[in-house]
Image (spheres, rainbow, N blue to C red):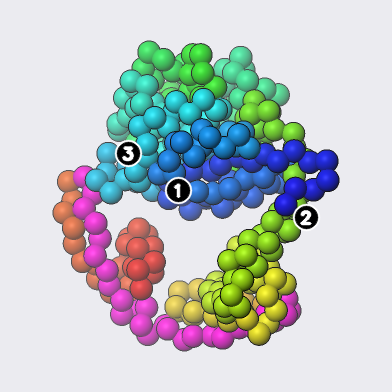
Amino acid sequence: MDSPGSVREYVVILDAGSQYGKVIDRKIRELNVESRVVPLSTPTEVLRGDHAIKGIIISGGPSSIYDDDAPKFNADLFEVGKPLLGICYGMQLLARTFGGTVGRAAVREDGQDEIWMDLSSPLFKGLGSGEKVLLTHGDSITDSGPQLKVVERSSANIIAAVQHQQLPLFGVQFRPEVELTEHGMQIFKNFLTLCGCHFNFTMEDREMVELRIIRKRTAQGQKVLCLASGGVDSTVCAVLLLKALGPERVVCVHIDHGFMRLRETEEVVAALKEARVSVVVVDARAQFAEATTEMPARRKCAPYRTGKLCEVTDPEEKRVIIGNT
């Protein structure tokens, strides 16, 4: 629901599987612009036909663009005719689409780095020529191609940002949504300005929209199961459900998988109770500790079954086992 005098507009975040997708969402809303996270495969006719969509952001993701199970996207995504910002994985899709080359650079970049910026780019308005950012990627753009201009390089001389020569299409290899990118919010603000956003969306608008959506989807009196980790996202979700439906229609469950910090489950339950959310705790520590899963094929590595979660040390294996259990 639009607030009085507001202009209905929003930015779409196409999710490529990034763990930071909701962080991007929050950062955009902190700049008083509505944002909506949707799948990377969202039909382009939807993006093109909705005039309320002012711009598009493609998130980063854990996959290589060459992986067999890489997120699917529409070939004409970059022809929608709206400003677009590709982050990490999104930048690599942009580069490959316009004739660039993506592959392995001489080094893998992981951590904060000071990079060189071409300040003629509108994306970097108000910034200095040297900025500290967070880089974390295996693949890199090794050649930007004929239609993209390089507007940023890392200290290792690896391409860190590009923009199209004529169209409002931009890509950054670093993560503007995290605190280690010191002026990431300014970069987002510059992009949203290029989109023509009015910066008049408020958290009160967001809450009313979410309450309306919850009530519409449960209009038949259904109860709702809410899985609460204790993080910001699930806690806010639980509180909104409680506000929209009342305690008799919300069943909130916290699963203790045994891999949290010491006494964190007790702290989660206490925090939820303070927010007046009643929560059921499921003790699944033994089940998770013994769990294994099938890892998908990646590049030259065939599919394989992991060891038990309590025994593996590889972070990606741990993430997939927990996600699949």
Residue of label 2: 204
Residue at the spot x=72%, y=72% of the render?
Answer: 243
Q: Secondary structure at mark 3?
A: loop
Residue 272 appears at what percent x and percent y? 67, 77
Which of the numbered marks, if any, corresponds to residue 39? 1
- Total residue callouts: 3
Q: Is residue 265 visible?
A: no
The type of residue carrying mark 2 is Glu
Circles 3 and 2: CB atoms closer than 8 Å: no
Of residue 202 and residue 108, the one placed in the foreground of this image is: 202
Does the magenta-highlighted stretch encompass residue 272? no
Q: Residues within 10 Å of mark 1 (few under 14, many from 20)?
A: some
Residue of label 3: 65
Which quadrant holds residue 78? top left
Relative to 261, residue 158 above or below: above
Q: Residues within 10 Å of mark 2 (few under 14, many from 20)?
A: few
Circles 1 and 2: CB atoms closer than 8 Å: no
Residue at the spot x=33%, y=72% of the render?
Answer: 309
Which dot, 1 or 3, sits closer to the camera?
1
Residue 310 lies left or right of residue 296; in this view the side is: right
Q: Is residue 240 visible?
A: yes
Report the quarter where the C terminus lies: bottom left
The type of residue carrying mark 3 is Ile
Residue 65 appears at what percent x and percent y? 32, 39
Q: Secondary structure at mark 2?
A: helix
Which quadrant holds residue 280? bottom right
Q: Which residues are magenta?
A: 273-299
Residue 237 appears at what percent x and percent y? 63, 67
Q: Residues within 10 Å of mark 3 (few under 14, many from 20)?
A: some
Residue at the spot x=44%, y=26% of the render?
Answer: 79
Residue that lies at the very extreme toward the right in this rendered image: 4
Relative to 104, residue 59 above or below: below
